[in-house]
């Protein structure tokens, strides 16, 4: 591997990210799958880095899942997006930062479509006006939330309490990065590093002391794919995609996986349980799985936030081996205590995947 | 005193035209921006279909043009149109008056790094057709393993590719891939060789014979399907994903060496030359001929002629034929 070759490509795919003043568009599923990730994105950007980020309760889903599953037409999806833009405009913001990769892709697709077909934009403006009497400006900048963390990765490194070094060996932790398909595969110039060798997550990992693993199925879909998982008959295909990735990364012995999409961490995490039940195989050390983290969770860990406040107990794959390698202090007894220190009950344990 | 004819470009087209103009009694002045003559072809080792050593062709061309006035490492500073000719100022300070100017600036080679999914410049064992010819010429290349077990060729890299803004067929790559695959099989008999192609365009004399021989005599596998991505395995082998469109199945192959058939593209400098001479470039970026059937070697401006791949992708025999035709056309023009 010629690392310099990747750097040359990365230099072609850099984008301007305004320093401040963002309107935050949340994800409809991330808050269920990884409940603390968005909270900690806001905590890190607003409280730690002092940025002005508007978190507005009036915005809705972007309609992305319905759009990609062919249950709503493009015009409807665009009108939903137009409403999000209207709420952003009303709040006085021009920069949109998006939590979800699917939404990020949809916002970009909509803006690019309007650029190519202005008559469609006019029609959507009319639709929105008829539906809710709102008007909007197209955002000046659309960034994914991982773009902002990438932009501020060195500031985070300066404030970090831990780095991604195995304290037992002194070696950098080996991290697999998985980029959501709609981050840059649709519009390579909208993502840091382009479509083939994106650097948005690898940049974070390297800034925080870890080492990125480039394995053969790196670009492969996580297995979610709307028409794979959401169509029940296709779920075997979803699982086989994830299985292919784990078989490919296994020889590199990764310590963790970092992701920037709502679906990817969920499926890379949960399917490890299913694979272990079906085949008896686990991919981590000593019967554990490979912990799968969102970039906010990984940022939160290096910054020293409590793993259970970051919601890591919600993961299927146990994160304790990773915490031990980094040297993060945690209270095992507090893992299943909720915000009010009430017991949130323990999950049933898998047959083969070690989880405690 | 012999009449000057300025020839811009010292590749096969420029040298062959100079040779012909010398025999017609003119003084060709060849302006070549590089240190050596011969252009892209001079970098090649052998030429199909007769496996002619390129060195022989180049030596002959250079010997036959010894009487011409040749400036290497020289560019064109500007060209002014006069009443009945052109004033050509070279970067070395020489000023030439010529009633006719022949443009023989050739083509550019597609930069394979732009097809990022193939990993040229990123993975250790990905090379181009041009790199391979250099290796055939004796240049060391540590990207080529000592004893590869499997070798892949990817056709149409940057040609017939709208995403790369090059819709034109590069014409010579299919045959070059067949030639190079045979040559590598001769060097590495144990290696399995795969050619990934969209469709094979083997139009020239003996080309089809080469293709049949590659399959029958050398056991080279031809797979109709585009490569979707290349990645590197832990042990350093490449993993190539493609589709075999004839069997309708996806394909994943472990490869020790991957050769990308970089296509011929219009030179970046074409627009500069065109604006200097007030001629046009075509929609594909190559220089625009007066028409593409009867007057391909003529521009729309009197006294400006073309030869070779500056107007589009050409084989070496086509280039040689055009150079001769251009020399004759210049002679006719100057004899009026």
Image (cartoon, helix red, strand yellow):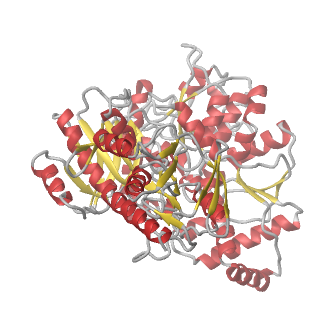
The location of residue A189, given as percent across then percent down, is 63, 54
Name the outermost residue toward the left.
B217
Label total for image: 0
Give coordinates of residue B139: x percent, y percent. Answer: 37, 29
Q: Residue furthest right?
A: A92
Q: Taking A292 as reference, is B116 above or below it?
A: below
Residue under the image location 85 percent in, 67 percent down: A89
Residue visible at 77% across and 26% down in the picture = A158
Of residue B220 and residue A93, the one placed in the foreground of this image is B220
- The residue sitting at 42% across, 57% down in the picture is B25
Q: Is residue B187 left or right of residue A329?
A: left
**Residue B279, image x, y percentages:** 60, 69
Q: Position of residue A250 (x, y in %)?
A: 40, 32
As drawn, A54 above or below A74: above
State the residue lying farthest toward the front.
B1
Q: Is residue A136 above or below residue B253?
A: below
Q: Quadrant of residue B6?
A: bottom right
Using the image as rendered, state which of residue B81 and residue A115 is in the foreground.
B81
Residue B245 visible to an observer of this rendering = yes
- At a point 84% along the width and 38% down the height, the residue shown is A49
On the question of residue A313 being in view, the answer is no
Q: A250 left or right of A67?
A: left
Residue A326, above or below A278: above
Query: Image quadrant of residue A273?
Result: top left
């Amino acid at each position: 591997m010629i690392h310099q070759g990747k750097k040359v490509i990365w230099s072609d795919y850099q984008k301007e990210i305004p320093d401040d003043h963002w309107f935050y568009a949340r994800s409809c599923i991330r808050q269920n799958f990884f409940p603390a990730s968005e909270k900690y994105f806001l905590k890190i950007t607003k409280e730690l880095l002092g940025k002005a980020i508007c978190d507005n309760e009036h915005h809705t889903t972007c309609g992305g899942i319905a759009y990609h599953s062919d249950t709503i037409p493009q015009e409807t999806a665009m009108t939903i997006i137009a409403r999000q833009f209207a709420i952003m405009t009303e709040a006085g913001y021009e920069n949109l930062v998006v939590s979800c990769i699917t939404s990020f892709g949809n916002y970009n697709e909509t803006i690019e479509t309007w650029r190519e077909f202005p008559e469609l934009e006019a029609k959507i403006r009319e639709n929105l006006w008829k539906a809710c009497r709102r008007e909007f400006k197209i955002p000046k900048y659309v960034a994914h939330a991982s773009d902002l963390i990438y932009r501020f990765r060195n500031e985070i490194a300066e404030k970090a309490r831990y780095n991604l070094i195995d304290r037992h060996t002194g070696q950098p932790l080996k991290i697999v990065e998985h980029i959501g398909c709609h981050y840059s595969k649709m519009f390579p110039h909208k993502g840091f590093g382009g479509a083939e060798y994106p650097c948005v997550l690898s940049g974070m990992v390297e800034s925080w002391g870890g080492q990125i693993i480039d394995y053969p199925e790196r670009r492969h879909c996580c297995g979610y794919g709307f028409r794979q998982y959401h169509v029940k008959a296709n779920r075997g295909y979803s699982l086989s995609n994830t299985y292919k990735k784990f078989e490919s990364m296994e020889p590199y012995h990764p310590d963790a996986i970092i992701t920037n999409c709502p679906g990817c961490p969920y499926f890379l995490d949960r399917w490890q349980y299913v694979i272990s039940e079906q085949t008896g195989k686990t991919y981590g050390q000593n019967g554990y799985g490979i912990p799968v983290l969102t970039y906010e969770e990984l940022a939160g860990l290096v910054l020293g936030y409590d793993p259970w406040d970051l919601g890591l107990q919600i993961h299927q794959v146990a994160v304790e081996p990773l915490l031990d390698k980094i040297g993060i202090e945690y209270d095992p007894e507090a893992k299943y205590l909720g915000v009010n220190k009430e017991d949130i009950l323990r999950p049933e344990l898998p047959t083969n995947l070690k989880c405690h | 005193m012999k009449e000057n004819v300025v020839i811009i470009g010292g590749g096969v087209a420029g040298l062959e035209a100079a040779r012909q103009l010398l025999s017609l009694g003119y003084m060709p002045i060849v302006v070549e921006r590089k240190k050596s003559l011969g252009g892209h072809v001079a970098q090649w080792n052998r030429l199909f279909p007769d496996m002619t050593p390129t060195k022989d062709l180049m030596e002959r061309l250079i010997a036959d043009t010894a009487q011409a006035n040749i400036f290497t490492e020289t560019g064109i500073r500007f060209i002014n149109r006069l009443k009945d000719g052109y004033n050509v100022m070279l970067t070395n300070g020489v000023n030439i008056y010529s009633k006719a100017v022949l443009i023989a600036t050739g083509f550019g080679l597609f930069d394979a790094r732009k097809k990022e999914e193939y990993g040229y410049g990123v993975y250790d064992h990905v090379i181009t057709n041009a790199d391979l010819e250099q290796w055939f010429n004796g240049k060391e290349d540590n990207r080529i393993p000592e004893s590869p077990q499997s070798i892949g060729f990817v056709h149409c890299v940057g040609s017939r590719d709208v995403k790369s803004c090059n819709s034109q067929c590069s014409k010579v790559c299919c045959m070059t891939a067949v030639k190079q695959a045979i040559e590598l099989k001769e060097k590495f008999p144990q290696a399995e060789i795969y050619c990934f192609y969209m469709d094979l365009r083997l139009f020239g004399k003996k080309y089809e014979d080469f293709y049949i021989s590659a399959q029958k005599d050398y056991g080279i596998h031809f797979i109709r399907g585009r490569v979707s991505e290349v990645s590197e395995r832990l042990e350093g082998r490449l993993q190539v994903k493609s589709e075999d469109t004839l069997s309708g199945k996806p394909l994943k192959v472990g490869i020790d060496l991957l050769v990308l058939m970089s296509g011929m593209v219009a030179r970046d400098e074409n627009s500069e030359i065109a604006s200097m001479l007030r001629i046009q470039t075509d929609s594909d970026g190559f220089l625009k001929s007066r028409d593409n059937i009867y007057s391909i070697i003529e521009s729309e401006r009197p006294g400006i002629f073309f030869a070779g791949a500056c107007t589009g992708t050409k084989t070496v025999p086509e280039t040689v034929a055009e150079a001769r035709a251009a020399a004759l056309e210049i002679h006719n023009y100057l004899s009026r």
